Image: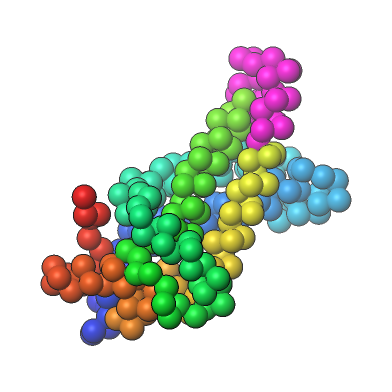
Amino acid sequence: MTYPPGTIIRYSTASRINHWITGICFTLLVLSGLSMFHPFLFWLSNLFGGGQWTRAAHPWIGCVLFASYMGMIVQFWRDELPSRDDIAWLRAINRVLVNNEEGVPEVPRFNAGQKFVFWAMALLVPVLFFTGLVIWEYYFSGYTTIEQQRIALLVHSLAAIGAIIVWITHVYAGLWIRGSMRAMMHGWVTPGWAYRHHRKWLRRLVETGSRGPLPRRQ
């Protein structure tokens, strides 16, 4: 894929495909899960062809989400590791929230907020997956007790609420920071965007003469 001259490659094509598979699966899981969560929301099951189809599709979509997010962990975990930069960035979070990053400490490829979303979902997605297996009656009801299924269902529901909150935060931040959606859709950002939001990452690209993602410096 070709990118506009003078731009910086923030996400590869494979990374973007992986990201959007994860996002689409999560959205479908939210809609189908909410339709089964409360009778008031059962009308959402019409999006999947009715209650039976929703119940059948939900766990399979969850399997795809789990595999997809594991792919994201493999690709990004090094850049997402916590560092001292995160503490400095969090101390200036009031400026970030009003989209005024003058005086905000320089950060690498991902800031503390992005790392929080990444690791929160890295915890919640496996919890949702394995508790989902416990309550997947068609295949696993013979291996678990009613009490275990009830506990798993409670944990699954609480983890889903937490994941939805994290997901809303992620979507809001992506829409709020101008240029972020372009990066997620097309893979590139301008040097000005990188200088404003991820200056330490840009400096390293300049130092190495690279135009795209680099492995995390140890």
Measured from the top left, where is residue 18 in percent x and y?
40, 55
Residue drawn at (70%, 31%), measured in percent from left and top?
Answer: 153
The magenta-colored residue range is 135-156
Residue 180 shows in the view: yes
Question: Is residue 147 inside the magenta stretch?
Answer: yes
* Coordinates of residue 193 in the picture (x, y in percent): 37, 79
Position of 125 relative to 204 (above/below): above
Q: Nearer the viewer, residue 8 or 203?
A: 203
Main secondary structure found in the magenta portion: helix
> Is residue 143 placed above or below 104 in the rendered structure?
above
Q: Which residue is located at x 65 percent, y 36 percent? A: 156
Residue 108 sits in quarter:
bottom left
Q: Quadrant of the N terminus?
A: bottom left
Q: State the residue at coordinates (38%, 50%).
A: 82
Q: 32 left or right of 211? A: right
Residue 170 on image: x %, y %: 54, 61
Examine the image and state in which quarter residue 55 appears: top right
Q: Is residue 216 magenta?
A: no
159 to the left or right of 52 = left
Q: Relative to 128, is 181 above or below?
A: below
Q: Percent from the top left, x then y, of residue 124?
A: 55, 41
Residue in the image at 52% along x and 78% along y: 99
